[in-house]
Amino acid sequence: FLATRLAANDVLDTTLLAGVVMDLDRGSRFISVEASRRLDGSTKLSLELRLFSNIDARDTLFYPLRQDDYIQLELTRYL
């Protein structure tokens, strides 16, 4: 497992959380990314991503999810 977290501590509240789970024996990978940033005082853009890559049939945890990649891009406006 390898991961990183970035909180830029800037006015636009930029954040990034990314990680990868790797099976070194079989080559399976699960990648996760979450990021967000304010565009201005009332608008925020967020990204959430989950990817399954090179999942081996013997991988009992991730094989059933091998076709369940997910991406969400969200624009939020605060009143």
Image: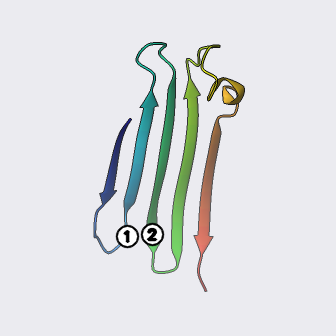
The local crowd at label 1, few if under 14, some if 14 to 19, many if 20 or more residues have their Cα within 10 Å, is few
Q: Colour mode?
A: rainbow
Residue depth check, mark 2 versus mark 1: number of the one nearer the observer: 1
x, y percentage for residue 25?
43, 13
Q: Residue at x 59, y 19 (%)?
A: 55
For badge 1, the amino acid type reads Asp
Question: Foreground: 1 or 19?
Answer: 1
Residue position for label 2: 38
Marks 1 and 2: in contact by CB < 8 Å?
yes
Q: Amino acid at mark 2?
A: Arg
Instruction: Name, please, the residue furthest toward the left.
Output: 9
Residue 29: percent from the left, percent from the top? 49, 26
In this picture, residue 1 sits left or right of residue 29: left
Quadrant that contains the N terminus: top left
Q: CA distance from mark 2 to mark 1?
A: 6 Å
Residue 23, by quadrant, is top left
Front-most of residues 10 and 33:
33
Question: Residue 30, image x and y in percent?
Answer: 52, 32
* Depth order, front residue of 4/36: 4
Label 2 sits on a secondary structure element that is strand
Report the residue at 37% width, 71% height from top. Answer: 12
Q: Position of residue 48 (x, y in %)?
A: 56, 50
Dot 2 alpha-carbon crowd within 10 angstroms: few under 14, some 14 to 19, many 20 or more: some
Q: Residue at x 46, y 68 (%)?
A: 39
Q: Earlier in the sequence, mark 2 or mark 1?
A: 1
The relative height of residue 45 versus residue 40 in the rendered view (above or below) is above
Q: Which residue in the structure is indicated by mark 1?
A: 13
The vertical placement of 3 against 10, above or below, is: above
Q: Is residue 4 left or right of residue 36?
A: left
* Dot 1: element: loop
